[in-house]
Amino acid sequence: MAGPTVDIITKHQIDKSREDTIRAFIKIYAGNLEGTDFDINNHPFSYEIGDEYEGELEELHILEKFLGWIPRDILGLIAYCNSNEDHEHLGKICYGLLDVLDGVVDFGGPLGDETNDQVILKNPGVYTYHLEEVSCPLTVMTPEAFQLWLHHKDFKMCK
């Protein structure tokens, strides 16, 4: 069964040095890493760097007004299982890497599908946007807003 995914949109290009930092963090959290694959408690995860499709990064320039900067790169994190534990691990890895990468969370879907709590949805660090190629709204969260979500009773990553 496929699990949740999340992207971190970064202010800076993910060069070799930043990827080495990503890998070091994952090794500390997961304990192992082969290529871009790792596991936590025998649950598989992976990461990828860059556009998922050609032109994705350029489309994200619409976020410049909200972010105050132009997105320069994307780190995708993937869980291959879908238990609550997988959602929690993915969220914690994502949160830990936000500071390292100086980025924001691209939730991958509408946060309103996961909660109706207005404290979360109306948080100034939560922004909903639309891309032509995607039929549903997408949600971006600052690290501070994502931390609130990570500890919320409705917490779940987007699948």
Image (cartoon, rainbow, N blue to C red):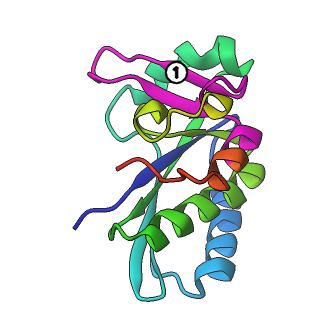
| Rendered view: 4 above or below 141 | below
The residue carrying pointer 1 sits among few (fewer than 14), some (14 to 19) or many (20 or more) residues within 10 Å by Cα, namely some
**Is residue 90 a member of the stretch shown in magenta?**
no
| Rendered view: 127 above or below 3 | above
Residue position for label 1? 128
Q: Where does the image place residue 108, in percent across and percent down from the top left?
A: 42, 38
* Residue in the picture at 71% in, 28% down: 125
Q: Is residue 15 visible?
A: no
Image quadrant holding the N terminus, namely: bottom left
- The one of 135 and 72 positioned closer to us in this rendering: 135
Q: Where does the image place residue 107, in percent across and percent down from the top left?
A: 49, 40
Q: Where does the image place residue 29, in percent across and percent down from the top left?
A: 65, 78
- The one of 129 and 35 positioned closer to us in this rendering: 129
Displayed quadrant of residue 36 = bottom left
- The one of 71 and 3 positioned closer to us in this rendering: 3
Q: Magenta span covers which residues?
A: 121-146
Residue that sits furthest to the left in the current view: 1
Q: Where does the image place residue 53, in percent across and percent down from the top left?
A: 31, 36
Q: In terms of secondary structure, where does tag 1 sit?
A: strand
Q: Is residue 45 visible?
A: yes
* Residue in the picture at 70% in, 22% down: 67
Q: Is residue 148 left or right of residue 83?
A: right
The number of callouts visible is 1
Displayed quadrant of residue 92 = bottom right
| Rendered view: 119 above or below 144 | above
**Is residue 133 a member of the stretch shown in magenta?**
yes
